[in-house]
Structure formats: structure tokens, C-alpha cells
Amino acid sequence: MLDSARILALLDSRRPGHALPQALYNDPAVHRFDIDVIFGRSWLMIGFEVELPKPGSYIALTVGRSPIIVIRDRGGDIRGFHNVCRHRGAQLCSDGAGRSARLVCPYHQWTYDLDGKLLHADRMAEDFDPAAHGLTPIRVELLAGCIYVCLSDDGPDFAPFRAVAEPQLLKHNFRDAKVAFSSVLVEKANWKLVMENARECYHCAACHPELGIAFPTGMSKHFDFTGDEHAANFDRRMADVGLDTTPREGDWWQVARFPLNPGIESMSMDGKPCVDRRMIDVNAREIGSLRWAIEPHNFSHALPEYAFMFSAFPTGPEETIVLSKWLVHKDAVEGVDYTLEGLTETWTRTNLQDRDLAENNQRGVNGLGYRPGPYSDDAEALVIRFVDWYGATARRHLEAA
């Protein structure tokens, strides 16, 4: 049972600009609250449209305790459902990707069409109504080739995010791409620690030598380069080729194109393009990275020749799954235009380093000596923003309950 008063008290005890109280990072009751309220009512990025190339192609995954499936129907539309049979609740498809002409429950063979309608249920009563037992839908939004889902009907308005992000993302042609590689990493840390780590680069100079080849690890706040001549020249060059460099954000999203380090073209081990086929049709070389991110769980980067997605999903009070995907041009040929090692090494090393940092952070947070410390206003502005968003979102639900 949810102890609303206790969680509110924990939120109230947090000092502004400081990390969260210990229980918000490791308590099983808080984990259940986060699953139901934070992840159950937020938009989540799960992948790309090109992963569903044909009718029947699907992605199945579990969000908290809820199996879901996103599938392309016979008309070409992408739909989302709870991946749960309407008979006795068995999971229809195992987590992962696949293709099926119909969705058949492995338990009693109830069969559903790709639009969720129940087609077959054997030996039911004469008054049984198949139309009343279709799959339960979830909300799906498609954004310039990206797939977002929300398990609740009262999630936030997607339109403001779309209005800002879509014109910029469309330039990277995600619908003319393919997923070259994906990975799943299990981190023994609370999802909020995983995301706090992902929302700052205060640690990058010391902990991410590979990422630091390209990434400007000393940037301030929300990609603030005020007074930096390299950034000023970048802004002018991007304006000349029609690329927006103004950071924009809403309550739960951020979009910003920012410069990489001088002379660097991509986030790779040598700073050079790691795929010969570019995804963006712009007559300029050093175009930086387009970063777009959503609370509670995701950031992504679009480089000239590839895109990278990072999405975190909590599986326990002290366990998080990190799903990563690399997107390249659909005609790029592995072994000719790119190698998987060259494409993935920078982010794979970064992910593994971040896993170790988050797990080490969790061990310290669990200890008797933990006291929430202050964030850096300059280096951890996006962490403060994330934690403030979490607190405000949790409080709105608890006070309305």
C-alpha cells in the first residue's frame, strides 16, 4: 500500500539544490511509486520506426511491471498495446523484437489481429463478445522516426515537444536509416542515480577519456557557451546551413544542437566520422551534435553519420536496465562503410564506465554515512532540473490523490 504521507515527507525534507534523501534511492515502496506514477504516466522513448519495417513487426518490452508491445498493423500504422492476453492475463510475446502475422497467446491460444482485435477464442459461452475483449491500447507518438509510448491517458501534452524537436530531427532522416546495433546493460543502481549521472558531465573529464575526445566536458548549465569564440563561430556556421543552435526546453524535455570540441566531426574514438554514409544532407562538416532528451529516462544524440539512443528502465529499487541503440543510414554496409567496433566503442565504453560510477554511487548512498550533498549550479544544472522535475511530478500526484 502506498504511504503517500511518508513519500511527501521525504520530498519535503530535501533541501533545494541538494541530492535526494536516502530512501528515495533505495526503498521498495518508493520504487513501486516510481513505476506506477513516474514511468506509468510519462512519455518514454523505446526505439525507432525503422525497427518495424513490415506489418507484424513488433518491439516488446516491460516497463516496470507492465509488458507492452508496439507493432505495425496491416495498414502500415504503428500501434501500442499492453502485451497481456484479455483472457487470464498471460504475456503474449516475449520481450524483444520479432514479426508475427497474428498475436497468439501461448497459454490458451486466444488470437489477436495486428490492430488488437480478438479473432479467436475457443469454447467460450454463446453470449461472449469478442469485440469487448480486444487488446488494451497504450498511447503512441511518432516523432521524425522515433517511437514514444505512454501507458496512461493523462500523460503530458506531447505537442510542444513535437513542435520544437520535429523540424530539427527530420533533417537527420531517421526514417531512411536502420538500427546497426543495440545493447542492454544491467546496472545495480536506482534509476534516479543512473539518470543523475546521465544528466551531467561534471565527472566526464576524469571518468570518460574516450567521450572527452569529442564532448566539451567543461560546458556550463544547459549547453551554455557564452563568451566562447568556438561556439560563436559554430552558431554562425550553423545558421548559414539552416541548423538551429538555440537550446530549448519544456517541463519534461530538452532539445539543443551544440558544438563538439574544435576540429572534431563526430563522437568517435578519433573524432572523425565512423560511418562513410552520412544521415544528414547538409553541406558542412563540423555540425556538432543534436541532443534531445526527455524526463524521466532518456537522452539521444544525432551526429552527421549516426544517432545514439540511451533509455533507462527501472527493474528494482537498486537495478536499472539501460537500452542503447545505434542508427545508421539504411544503405550503409557493415564492413564497408563502418565497423561495429568503430561505431559503438565510444558509447559502449562510456556506458560501462557510467555503470560502474552509478553502482559505486548506490553503495555509498546505502551507507549510514550518506547525507544528501549540494549540486553544482554550473556543472550539474541538468541534474538539478531532473531532480526538481521528479519532486514536482511526484508531489502533484500525491497531493491530488
Image (tube, rainbow, N blue to C red):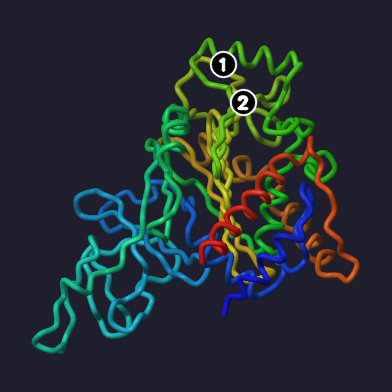
Please tell me which residue is depicted at 68% across the width and 45% down the height of the picture: 199
Mark 2 neighbour class, 10 Å CA radius: few under 14, some 14 to 19, many 20 or more: many
**Residue 212: assigned label:** none
Q: Answer yes or no: do the residues labelled 2 and 1 have beta carbons within 8 Å? A: yes
* Left or right of 262, for residue 299: left
Residue highlighted by disc 2: 288
Please tell me which residue is depicted at 59% across the width and 12% down the height of the picture: 237
Residue 66 lies, in percent from the top left, at 45, 70
Residue 281 lies, in percent from the top left, at 45, 22
Furthest toward the right, the residue is: 369
Q: Residue type at mark 1: give it.
A: Met
Asked if 102 appears above or below 202 in the picture, the reply is below
Please tell me which residue is depicted at 65% across the width and 75% down the height of the picture: 28
Decide which of 96, 229 is in the foreground and name it.
229
Please tell me which residue is depicted at 60% across the width and 62% down the height of the picture: 321
The residues tagged by marks 2 and 1 sit, at their Cα atoms, a distance apart of 9 Å
Q: Residue type at mark 2: give it.
A: Gly
**Residue 238: assigned label:** 1
